[in-house]
Image (tube, rainbow, N blue to C red):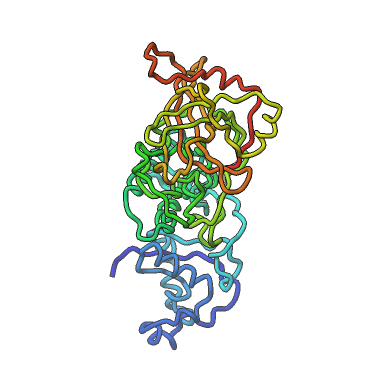
Amino acid sequence: MQGFYAALSYVWGEPQPHSVCTTKLSTYLESIDILLLPKTIRDAIFCTYSLNLRYLWVDTLCILQDLNEDKQREIPQMCDIYRCAYVTIIAASSHKVSEGFLHNRKKPVETLLPFWCPDGRLGTISVDESDGSARTLSSNDVEALLTAWRNVLYDYTRRAVSDPSDRLVAISGIAQLFQRSWGSSNRYIAGLWERNLSSDLLWYRNRPSDGSLVPGQFLAPSWSWAATIGCIAAGWDKKVGNIIWDVHSCDAIPVSDNHPLGQVRGGKLIVRAIMRDVTWDPAEPELFELKRPCSNNHAKRRQSNEVTAPSKGRERHIGYGYFDYDSAGIGADKGKAVVVSSDKDENPGYLTGLIVVPAESAGEFRRVGIFHVDGRFYEDEEAPYCDVKSWLDTPSTEAITII
């Protein structure tokens, strides 16, 4: 018989009473009770099965241990046995056969081994136990991962989920594959990636009617696309140039510690940013700035989640809002514009950020959409205009918590 097989290289370290011998050969040819085998060999069987290989070569089971003739015949062949193996499993961390090797352990010192390269030259190869997280991603790798995730989100959010609470659960397997590619350089937070967080937070919908809430049910923090139902476009479509705000923290609390990439039961995004009071027409995407009144209570008001009420003649059309769902779900027609980024020009021409409204708890807000304001001047009186320079010249930023 011929076929692909794995070979095990390991240290005995102790007697193996269940090795194959002449008295057990006929029984072992019928079947072998795997529970009688030491841990290292059981681990090797598991690895072989996981690699979709049918055969495993282990000296204690493939050489008759009580027959010198068999040893003399097989031992000279061991060089070819290992050389011809499809893969060799080296249980380097196991000091004796009963210890096994599939367990948490310190990273071993790298060892270089000789390896014949395809072009005939003799090179070296090193085997690393990591899943690739030691690897440094190139700029092309990063861009490829971001683009792939954007495409996944667009395709996934177009689909219906029977149970809305499974919105993060159903995509967690794919998220896990991406996590392996990112390695330790990135953290997955309720559907967003920390490495690209400012851009990820700018997901949006072209029409509020494309999205909906699930009344009385928490799906995810409001800043996550998983908080609503419906197709989204990822934030990369809205150019993110210079990141202006400071992210202090962004965390989500998983329902189960055993499934950190799955369903969550809470989360907070804490940032320090330039903010402006804004209002909007629930039926239209236009966004208007509310000029802040001058008063001694201004500093006190900034520490709460109060939004200044509009005064006649104080509204200015500054840009457009892309809301997560319709006005019934928003429950308000005024809130705050939280600036995330500007373009990279020396004199920035636009700003992009989140639209938030007060949440139930004092001092906290929830996201309801994103905004895009234009600082270019048009002769058309109906065209929006935002004094971007005055926004950027704001003497101080404000801390805000978004849940």
Q: Farthest left residue?
A: 1
Q: Nearer the viewer, residue 232 or 64?
A: 232
Point 56% across, 61% down: residue? 257
Point 56% across, 45% down: residue? 359
Q: Is residue 127 visible?
A: no
Residue 216 is left or right of residue 275, and the answer is: left
Snapshot quadrant of residue 204: top left
Q: Nearer the viewer, residue 350 or 184?
A: 350
Point 56% across, 42% down: residue? 358
Q: Farthest front residue?
A: 312
Check the picture and name the quadrant holding the N terminus.
bottom left
Give the image location of residue 296, x and y in percent.
71, 27
Q: Is residue 60 above or below residue 184?
A: below
Q: Is residue 145 above or below residue 71?
A: above
Give the image location of residue 397, x and y in percent.
63, 29
How many numbered dots are placed on residues in this image?
0
Residue 272 is left or right of residue 227, and the answer is: right
Q: Is residue 198 above or below residue 30?
A: above
Give the image location of residue 228, x and y in percent.
42, 49
Q: Is residue 160 visible?
A: yes
Give the image location of residue 43, x and y in percent.
49, 69
